[in-house]
Amino acid sequence: MANRDEMIMNIDLNDKPVEITEGYLLRDLLKQFGYQRCAVIINGKHILLKDYESCILKNNDKVKLVRILGGG
């Protein structure tokens, strides 16, 4: 839960509204929603796996998470 001092921001996650706190990292969003292996697209831009740890989400970001399925 957010402190009163923390700014609440809104993002769209797979076309659904989600509230997050200012400074929320992509890696935290993935953990919160149970995504371990997935492709991430923010505002139409593919995010590289190496950037998941440092990517800070911004107000009104449009985030798409796509699970990666293995096959053979």
Image (cartoon, helix red, strand yellow):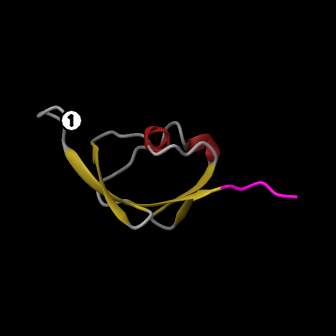
Q: Quadrant of the N terminus?
A: top left
Magenta part of the chain: 68-72
How many marks are shown on the rendered structure?
Answer: 1
Q: Main secondary structure of the magenta part?
A: loop
User: Going by the image, does 43 lie left or right of 41?
Assistant: left
Secondary structure category for the residue under label 1: loop
The quadrant of the picture occupied by the C terminus is bottom right
Q: Residue at x 68, y 55 (%)?
A: 68
Q: Residue furthest right?
A: 72
Residue 67 position in % (x across, y down): 62, 56
* Residue ranking furthest to the left: 4
Up the image or down, 59 lies above or below 30; here it is: below
Residue at figure coordinates x 50%, y 68% from the top left: 44
Asked whether 51 or 26 is in front, the reply is 26
Q: Which of 69/60 is in front?
A: 69
Q: Residue at x 61, y 51 (%)?
A: 38
Tell me the amino acid under the disc marked 1.
Ala
In percent of width and height, residue 63 lies at 44, 59
Q: Nearer the viewer, residue 66 or 60?
A: 66
**Residue 52 at what x, y percent from top left?**
54, 42
Please determine whether, in this image, residue 48 is positioned above or below residue 63: above
Q: Position of residue 58 (x, y in %)?
A: 34, 52
Which residue is the site of mark 1? 2
Q: Nearer the viewer, residue 69 or 65?
A: 69
Mark 1 Cα shell of 10 Å, populated few (<14), some (14-19), many (≥20): few
Q: Residue shown at 27%/55% (left/top)?
A: 10
Question: Is residue 35 in the magenta section?
Answer: no
